[in-house]
Amino acid sequence: MGSACSRDPPATAKDEPQFSGNVGYDTVDTPNSNNSCLLAVKFVSGEKIRVFKYVSDKDDWSICHEIPVGGIFRTLIVQQYMLFIDWVDARRICCYDTTTRAIRTLDPFKEDVFRYYFAAEFQNKLYLFADVEDKRKVHVWDPAKDRWSEAPKLNVGRVHAAAVSHRGYLYVAGGSKSFPHNTELRSVERYDPRGRSWKRCADLVQARCAAGLVSAGAFLYIVGGECSEIPTNMVERYDAQLNKWTQLMCMEIPKHYPACAYYNNCLLACGGPAIDQDCKIVEEFNEAENKWRRRNSMPTQGPYSYMIVTPAWLRQLESLN
């Protein structure tokens, strides 16, 4: 059963989203296991950050690197950098250079600039959302210049949303109008860097915040999240060609802030930010069979981030051991 909550009513015919049929000028599909590697980054307060790599023929995870940074973080990769962003307010952003082992802190903002933020890598830059003064603001860090700037504002201000790069666009989906929750959104928009503008896309079937958003081949998937502070197991797929979200088979376990990835032609979802038994559970969705199944669990409890990297990127990381 999926969550019954549905907020942020869909657009009426009068304000139907204006959407172009152009599905993306970067049409390279998400890579799979023959030319990519799957990593999981574990982050627990007071412990070193541990990076695990997935060994597909054994359906197992092994530690491939440790980073001496303590705290509770989400992880993003931007070029050769691993960025660890403070879980709650992004006050602390640690930057780990995988070519030099250098660790430094990016801290260009005043103390209270972010709350309940969300972030994404897009075109080799970090996009950071949910400025407390204006939830429509978009801050961008360019590693080549080591400088922050602002991108055009979102159409809808939001926190606890999900963002991902997909086929030449940056998508933002769901979230909530404020915190605490109970103001979940169904709205979705995407950023076109050529026109430097955000355009509305079709609304989600299910309003939600704290969800996972994954670029998966030709499609986007939104996974889990929360509605009225209750974790949901609902999953939807977005077809940009049709500008339509479709509800899929629900996961076994409801998940908020799930760690998600698309790997070996399958969608993977792992626990949420809480340190409990469910965080070890990895589920895999095979769309051809329309079925979720359990994979081998993560080796230890704790919140994780998933990411897909090239073999060369992984070799560089392991060379630092």
Image (cartoon, rainbow, N blue to C red):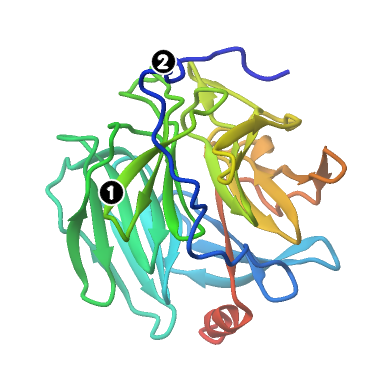
The answer to whether any part of residue 55 appears in the image is yes
Camera-nearest residue between 54 and 208: 208
Q: Residue at x 76, y 31 (%)?
A: 249
Q: Are marks 1 and 2 in contact (CB under 8 Å)?
A: no
Question: Dividing the picture into quarters, in which one does residue 118 lie?
Answer: top left
Residue with the most extreme left position? 110
Look at the numbered disc 2 and give the secondary structure of its residue: loop
Q: Nearer the viewer, mark 1 or mark 2?
A: 1
Residue at 87% across, 42% down:
289
Label at residue 277: none
Where residue 47 sits in the image (x, y, percent)? 48, 56
Element at badge 1? Answer: strand
| Image location of residue 1, percent across then percent down | 73, 18
Using a 10 Å C-alpha cutoff, classify the residue at mark 1 as few (fewer than 14 neighbours), some (14 to 19) or many (20 or more). some
Q: Nearer the viewer, residue 277 or 86?
A: 86
Which quarter of the figure has residue 239?
top right
Compared to 64, does 86 lie above or below?
above
Q: CA distance from mark 1 to mark 2?
A: 29 Å
Q: Which residue is mark 2?
A: 182
Give the residue type that dot 2 points to: Asn
Which residue is labeled 1 in the image? 197
- Give the amino acid at mark 1: Ser
